[in-house]
Image (cartoon, rainbow, N blue to C red):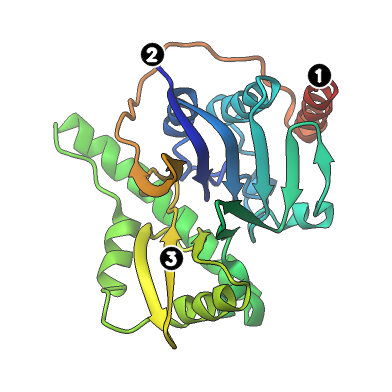
Amino acid sequence: MELKKIDVSVISDLHLATHACKAKAVLRYLKSIEPEKLILNGDIIDSWRFSRSYFPKSHLKVIRQIIKMMEKGVKVIYITGNHDDFMRKFDKVELGNLRITNHYILEKKGHRTWIFHGDIFDNIIHRARWLAKSGAAIYGLFTLINKFINALLKLAGIKEITIYKSIKTFLNKKNNTYSHFEKAILNAARNKNCQTVICGHTHSPCDMIMSDQNTNIRYINCGDWVENLSAVEFSDNKWSLVYFTEYIEDEPNTDVDIPNKKDLYKQLYREIIFSSNLN
């Protein structure tokens, strides 16, 4: 397969360690690109759900692929999100080609792009964390129900559906005004003198121009790999919101050896350290 050469790829909200994650699609996407930088824009590993000891082989393959990309010289920027906020204490840590940070500014020819996860502008996260975690649990329940329904639909030869996505689309019909989330981002981007902002968090891919007080800010939400299989790419000196459509459910069995669940974090740590020693 010919690799697509790009300057930067930004992906967010993989939610590895949950049933909702489309890990096979993530893996196929990562294997299809050759970026100079890969920006993981938060909620990559879902620590809110990790205690359930669910981390299948396909999810570990995604981690392995990212490590392989680092070994080949790809700079990986890991921006922390709310579901992987345990990483925030490692802000500004660099290990070889891996950099962990809470936000990142990319400057190209005087154009500044501010990249962050987005939960800092979510009032629910800060004012009612218990509610946010309850919502995540409900989301997980919908995912399991959705898998069961889709299994029946597949047997009947009917196209699969995404229940949660349909409900969210119905509840969040776009109007002509900016949401509180978008207004907060617009004001913050103006203060940081950035012309473009890229975030995730909402699982709602979007590319639009926001205007206020004679200021135009390009707002891009890179979406997720649970519902939309979307990413943001920088190539030919421009940003593009792209959707990955080459997802195939069944793949050849090339499973790697999986460590005991209790040793998973230790093995991932060793692999990251090993990859940093190669550079």
Badge 2 crowding class, 10 Å Cα cut-off, few under 14, some 14 to 19, many 20 or more, is few
**N-terminal-most mark, 1 or 3:** 3
Q: Is residue 17 visible?
A: no
* Alpha carbon distance from label 1 to label 3: 37 Å
Which element type, helix, strand or loop, lies under badge 2? loop
Badge 2 amino acid: Met
Does 158 sit left or right of 200 as displayed?
Answer: left
Q: Amino acid at mark 1?
A: Leu
> Which residue matches tag 3?
219
How crowded is the residue under tag 1: few (<14 C-alpha within 10 Å), some, or many (20+)?
A: few
Label 2, label 3: how many angstroms apart (C-alpha)?
A: 32 Å
Cα distance in 3D space between marks 1 and 2: 26 Å
Name the quadrant of the N terminus: top left
Quarter holding residue 103: bottom right
Q: Kindly identify which residue carries mark 2.
A: 1
Q: What percent of the width, then of the height, locates residue 166?
A: 27, 60
Q: Dot 3: within a 10 Å radius of its alpha carbon, few (fewer than 14), some, or many (20 or more) residues?
A: many
Circles 2 and 3 in contact, beta carbons < 8 Å: no
Q: Is residue 245 left or right of residue 215?
A: left
Please identify the quadrant where the C terminus is shown: top right
x%, y% of residue 201?
52, 61
Q: Earlier in the sequence, mark 2 or mark 3?
A: 2
Residue that carries the numbered disc 1 in the rendered image: 278
Q: Residue at x 83, y 31 (%)?
A: 266
SS for dot 1: loop
Name the residue: 81% across, 51% down: 92
The kind of secondary structure element at disc 3 is strand
